[in-house]
Image (spheres, rainbow, N blue to C red):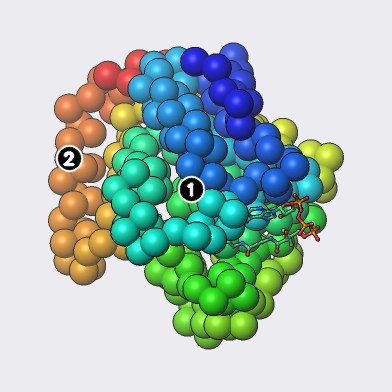
Amino acid sequence: MTYENIVVEYSVQGVGVVKLNQPRTFNALSGPMMDEIMAALEAMDADQAIRCMVLTGTNRVFAAGADIKEMSEASPAEMINKAFIARWDRLRHLNKPLIAAVSGYALGGGCELAMACDMIVASESAVFGQPEINLGVMPGAGGTQRLIRTVGKALAMEMCLNDRRLTAIEAERVGLVNKVFPVESYLQEAINLAAQIAARAPLAIRLIKETVNMALETPLSAGLAYERNNFYMLFSTQDQKEGMAAFLDKRSADWKGE
Ligand code: DAK
């Protein structure tokens, strides 16, 4: 498949990189852009050779939000339109870990897109914010819900009510970002992190992602039961036998994903 708004790269270490590439519009997340992002990520998710994915933008901008031009004349019916919402919802159904590598602006839908990823690696120039209030609207792709779970109510309120933006260092301090690197190296660092995860036991990685995310959906008792069942389930895999045998033999494990 050829893409117009993104660039897709596959590394030998089992890492797939999707790069948003419309710097002219600050990577505004138009319908066609979101369609391409989702098509590329879902293709990687289904590809046996890929075990971890990285979503990035340019050094200047990750994404400045949904496309304001596209939305400006929209009717409520068009906004409720299944395709618009479904594109974003598909992000939640990816099985493999997805790391956002963010540099420059991550605003509105751009911040929400980064937060929908499993981890965020940022450059020193990254800026995170939910400026929808300036447009007379509010976050619509998870901003209010994911921020409060990550940075807490006080900061989430300030970001959404008053366009408070976080620098990369602030975002790291409050737990929104895993780690901050210089602009020259953040993408490579994100790929290195993805390569480390890609080299680990695939079935356990998949269940860990699913189980950690389940914690956001369930009360503690149900989450603990879900965790325990997935833990037991991994004892039916060859990778569990191999991992524990390798530890006892003092050698590295050879993961099969079976
Ligand atoms: N949409 C369209 N074009 C954009 C854009 C955007 N979000 N952001 C920037 N651009 C375009 C500008 O119009 C300009 O185009 P030209 O005039 O050159 O043609 C070009 O990019 C450069 O922008 P500036 O001239 O403004 O550049 P500056 O360096 O001065 O400022 C900026 C950069 C990123 C700070 C500024 O452009 C800005 O504030 N942009 C808007 C940020 C924003 O308000 N974002 C939130 C948008 S609302 C949902 C899913 C998603 C969403 C909601 C619901 N569902 C699934 C229900 C998401 C909503 C949003 O994101």
6 sits left or right of 205 in the view: right
Vertical arrangement, residue 91 with respect to residue 222, above or below: above
Q: Nearer the viewer, residue 230 or 32?
A: 32
Is disc 2 surrounded by few (<14), some (14 to 19) or many (20+) residues within 10 Å? few
Q: Nearer the viewer, residue 227 or 213?
A: 213
Q: Which mark is residue 229?
A: none
In the image, what residue occupies the spot 54% across and 45% down? 30
**Residue 41 visible in the picture:** no
Asked where in the image residue 240 lies, by quadrant, the reply is top left
SS at badge 1: loop
Asked where in the image residue 196 lies, by quadrant, the reply is top right
Q: Position of residue 181 (x, y in %)?
A: 76, 49
Vertical arrangement, residue 201 with respect to residue 27, above or below: above
Determine the quadrant in which ligand 1 lies: bottom right
215 sits left or right of 17 in the view: left
Asked where in the image residue 3 lies, by quadrant, the reply is top right
SS at badge 2: helix
In the image, what residue occupies the spot 70% across and 46% down? 25
**N-terminal label among 1 and 2:** 1
Give the quadrant of the C terminus. top left
In the image, what residue occupies the spot 62% across and 48% down? 28
**Residue 239 visible in the picture:** yes
Q: Position of residue 94 (x, y in %)?
A: 36, 37
Q: Position of residue 43 (x, y in %)?
A: 41, 23
Three-letter code, disc 2:
Tyr
Residue at which label 2 appears: 232
Q: Position of residue 110 (x, y in %)?
A: 58, 54
Give me the C-alpha separation between circle 1 and circle 2.
27 Å
In the image, what residue occupies the spot 45% across and 59% down? 74
Three-letter code, disc 1:
Cys
218 sits left or right of 179 in the view: left
Residue at which label 1 appears: 117
